[in-house]
Structure formats: structure tokens, C-alpha cells
Amino acid sequence: MPRRNLQNAAGIIAISLLCWHVVSSATTHQGYDIFRIFVATIGQVEREYVQPIESNEIFQGGIAGLIASLDSESSYLTPSTYQQLQEEAEKGEIGIYVESIGQQRGIRVLGVLPGSSAEQAGILPGDVIAEINDQNSTRLSLEESLLLIRGEPDSDLSLKIYRPSGFLEFPLRPSAISDPENGAPTVANDGSITISIQRSTLVPPDITGLDKQENGTWNHWITEQHNIAYVRLVSLNSGTSQSLSQLMTKFSQDSCRGVILDLRFNVSGSRAEAIKVADLFISEGELARVRGPNLQEEHWTALSDDTFEQVPLAVLTNQFTAGPSEMLAASLKDNDRAPIIGERTRGKTSVTRIIPLKDGKSALKLTVGSCIRPNGKDLLRYPGDRASDSWGVKPDFEIGQMAEVIMEHFRTRTISEPPTFQDEALSKALELLTSETEPENTDS
């Protein structure tokens, strides 16, 4: 028997033994039928598929499909991917500062950090990256895609991008493109744009303001008349709460009458830092909980020390508010500390772990816990959840605006250009903080 056939037979025997073990404990024939189909499928692929394929590829593909079907955060890490992720962690390279999720047409950008190569090239939240260095991202796992995006500082990266909204009034800018002599990229017949940009090691700020001054500092005051301050939390990394506390102290000394906290496009950070920021504004009550089948439930309550409880607060969110920033928004909303203005958050808040498998080479990235709001509801949007289901954080005042417009507005603030549009959510927050207006929607 050829070596390959022997491997195939051994693989099928192993699967069959697994099936027998499961079926032997089943109370119905349902388990037997499912695994019989599984074994038959492997046999058909072995015999009929147009190209030769190794058994290991079939088995790893089966595992990957199983895990990927659970939710968008869970995945199977092959030995090569797992090893590269460990090496990347040790190297500390952060690529082009783009957060992505899996999608049928590639990977979708969730956030673009200020000052990054991605922002300079004009990449926006919602953009779909279909190819990375000429490799089709639809055939790659999320982790494999991110490994291709990351790389050595000052090295070049080619990306093929679709903008699903078709909103191209703000085209990709050539300022960060590796070969500017060829001019700005053109839109291909399929609606895509291919760009080559340079990776960097720039560390973007966690906190920005309304506009950047010539001396490099941020102006946070919206109007001197009302003494209302604006703070954009770009991320919730270690030290964000301490920096915000220092800002709030300064605001209080300047007779601040209210603060607008902007969480739009905030997709990264830690749960611990989100809790610390919430604790700056809440003196008592529950802030959040985390629970899972094999997790010891964690529970956070507010501490009364060093809080800015008397400062009026309003929070801005949108569909790209994801992760720990959703915990922060939920904590402020459920404790009646601040109205939420804008759009419903994304529902991507969970506890994930990298679990090494017994072979010592591969691993699972698995969702193992839920983040629970003070009102007892789960923040995570599970596969199959509809808009009517409970997930994320709904705004008290719903105001939808195109992500492209808002991101371009943020960009003009960092390069001392005049604003290009009316930020309706920001205007509503200012109205609420300067007058008494009742919320029109108090759903979750």
C-alpha cells in the first residue's frame, strides 16, 4: 500500500475509533449518523477531489471549520501559525495598527489608530482587505492574515481594499504610499484599490482632544462659554485611566461644567483599564462581571475614592465601539451616570484564551467567558443573534453617521485643518450638557 494511502487509512481508523467512543455513550442514533457522514465525507474527498490532498490537511481543516463556526473570535491555530504568533509576540511588532475580523470577502477593518501608516494611507473602518501581498485573504484565517500584515519596521506591504459603502469622496491619500511617483492609486474595474504602504513602529496616543495645537498639545475645550470639555479615548491601554484622571483634575480646576467622552472607533485595550476608567466617574454600584463555564466569576464594584462624580458626562458610541470600550459604555449607562449618544456598539466583548493542544504545536483561540453588564445582560453578539436581541449597548439618543465621514473629521483635527462636516452626535452631547433634555429611548 502506498505511504499516502496508509496515512489515509490510519487517519480514517482514528476518526472511526473516535466515532465509536462517542456513539457508545449516545442514547440515540443521531450521534452515529453524524459521525458516519463525517467519515464518509473524508473518504469522498480522498477519492474524488481534483488535487491530491494530505490527510493532515483534511483533519486540520475539519477542526478549523468546527471552531470557526462557534463565533468570530474563536479559531484553530495550526502549528505554523501558532509558532509565528509566539515569535511575533516576542518581537513586539505591531504592523500597520489595524484591527480586523474575519469576513467572507476577506477581513474587515474595525479600527484605525491616529498617526498610523494605515490612517495616513486613508484606510477606514469598514474597509475590506481582500488581498495581502497578493494572497487572497478569504483563504486565510484571521490570525494568518494578521501575520502577513505585521512585519519589520519600514518594510512595504501591499493591500487590495474594497470600500463596501462605495464612499470615495475621501480617496486613499498617497502621502504614506511607498511609491508616490506613480501618484494616488486608481479604482480597478472590480471597485478595489491596491496600495503599497510602509509599516512603522509609531505608538499612537490613547487620548486625543478636539483639535491639535501647533505646539503638539490637544485642545479639549469645545466652547469657552459653556466650559464643556471633549475627550476621545482612542484605546484603553495600561495607563489610560491615570492620564484621564490627570485631565479630569485639570478640567475641575478650570471650572468644567461637563465632559463629552468619545468612544467611537475604540476597539482595543484591556478590561482592567475599562473598569478603572468607569471607576473615575462612579462612586458606588456594580461596574461589570465576567463569567464562563470554567471561569471563576469576577465581579467589579465602584470605589468611592478619587471619583469625579459631580462632573456631568455624555458618551459617544458607534458601530465600531468594540471590546473593553463597550464595558465602559455599559457601566456608565446602567449606573445612570451618562447618556449614550450615537449608534449601537458592536457586541464584540468576550473573554478569549489561547489553549495549547496536546501535540504541543497547535492551539485553540477560544471564547471561554462572557462580559456581563451591571443590568445582567451579555454584551457579546453571538452567531445568529438579530438586531432585536440583547447585545452590545444601545444609545439613548440614536444618531447614525457614515464612518468614513467621522474618521476623516478626526484626521483633519490632527493636521490643523478646519472641520469638514457637522458632527451631529457631538452637537447632541453638547446640547444635553448645556440644557435639560429627556432621553427618547431607554432600551438596553
Image: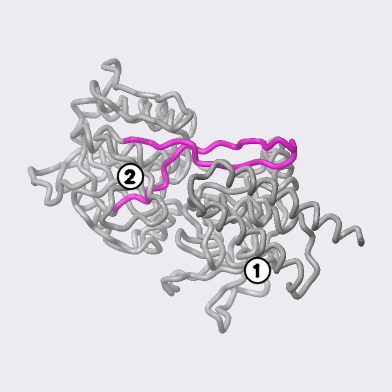
Q: Residues within 10 Å of mark 2 (few under 14, many from 20)?
A: many
Q: Quadrant of residue 376?
A: top left
Which is closer to the viewer, label 2 or label 1? 2
Q: Residues within 10 Å of mark 1 (few under 14, many from 20)?
A: few
- Mark 2 vs 1, N-terminal side: 1
Quick check: is 431 in the magenta stretch?
no
| Residue 93 coordinates in the image, percent (x, y) | 67, 43
Residue positioned 45% across, 69% down in the render:
170
Magenta residues? 344-372
Q: Which residue is mark 1?
A: 180
- The foreground one among 274 and 348 is 348
| Identity, as a three-letter code, of the amino acid under mark 2 | Asp
Q: Which mark is residue 38?
A: none
Residue 114 to residue 227: above or below: below
The reply to whether residue 434 is visible in this rendering is yes
Q: Which residue is mark 2?
A: 262
| Identity, as a three-letter code, of the amino acid under mark 1 | Pro
Judged left or right of residue 2, residue 218 is left
The C terminus sits in image quarter: top left
- The foreground one among 53 and 219 is 53
The N terminus sits in image quarter: bottom right
The kind of secondary structure element at disc 2 is: strand
| Residue 183 coordinates in the image, percent (x, y) | 62, 74
Q: Residue furthest top?
A: 305
Q: Quadrant of residue 399?
A: bottom left
